[in-house]
Image (tube, rainbow, N blue to C red):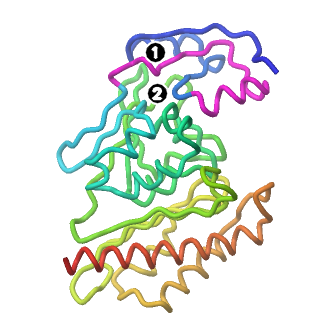
Amino acid sequence: MYPAVFEYLKPSSISEAITLLQQHGEDAKLLAGGQSLVPMMKLRIARPRYLIDIHRISDLNYIREQAGQIRCGAMTRHVQIEESELIRDRVPMLCEAASAIGDAQVRNRGTLGGGLVEADPSGDYGAVVLALNAQMKCISPRGERVIPAADFFTFAYTTALESDEILTEVIFPFPDSNSAGVYLKLERVAGDFAIAGAAVQIGLGQNGVCSTVGVGVTGAATIPQKAVSVESLLQGKKITPQLIDEAGRLIQEGAEPIEDTRGSASYKKKALSAILRRAIAESLRRAEAKRSS
């Protein structure tokens, strides 16, 4: 099928893009990488009357270190994140998530901001931004605001962004120097959306006790979930195989996955439990290796 008729708009600056969004409101859609929006337009699931292409705005494409944080412009491509030495050194799980997205074509065109704003319940970045306590910087005619990752996702394919608001930057605090993390997912074929995914960042203190922990999961509900119950379970304790099994039980009991072609709700709960247990064990292994090196 062909998309419905639309007007193509190409702003050259963030302020111009905001003005266009303000003018056209709900009738407009932002085009970032286009790896999800364009197929939906072809199927006429999405029918924007105005398509605002922001991928040429250079001010939205960067990776930089600033004041103990990594700041990524919303138009940063997946492949740039995957290949960034700065990100690999500071928050390697973000590289792992980027490398797990789609195929080479998708990673070369798709963007960090586009993936987050799409808010697919089975997407990869959601779990990572939750585990790392990232923040989303947004701009609208009313000015700037910062949305914590925990408040960003509101429902399947829906975020806290207003209709005239643009996600411009994602801010990742540096994890503690004694911590390590991992992103793992179960997928039908390489590059597919996750049946279940888990991002875990663990820091170890004295005697190997868990001093800091962040856990995000995808595929557990209509939005990516910050697994607060699992974080509370692990925090301040020495992580044992029994504790990891308990974390798996907790996440399975609390999950309400969407039943679809990737599996039944019962199967997805079991898959989520298994992938979370693997992610905790691997994150712990990496943190112990880092601590002893």
Residue 18 in which image quadrant:
top left
**Percent x, y for residue 73?**
36, 33
Disc assigned to residue 70: none
Identify the residue under disc 1: 17
- Could you tell which of marks 1 and 2 lies nearer the N-terminus? 1
Mark 1–mark 2 Cα distance, whole angstroms, equals: 8 Å
**What element does badge 1 sit on?**
helix
Disc assigned to residue 166: 2
Quadrant location of the N terminus in the rendered image: top right
**Percent x, y for residue 15?**
38, 14
* Residue depicted at 51% across the width and 11% down the height: 20
**What element does badge 2 sit on?**
strand
Q: Is residue 106 visible?
A: yes
Q: Relative to residue 60, is residue 32 drawn left or right? A: right
* Label 1 CA crowd tier, 10 Å (few <14, some 14–19, many 20+): many
**Percent x, y for residue 17?**
46, 15
Q: Is residue 145 visible?
A: no
- Considering only vertical position in the picture, is 31 above or below 136? above
Mark 1 touches mark 2? (CB < 8 Å): yes
Residue type, label 1: Ala
Residue 58 on the magenta span: yes
The residue stretch that appears in magenta:
34-59
**Percent x, y for residue 187?**
65, 59
Q: Nearer the viewer, residue 161 or 288?
A: 288
Q: Nearer the viewer, residue 281 or 80?
A: 80
Residue type, label 2: Ile
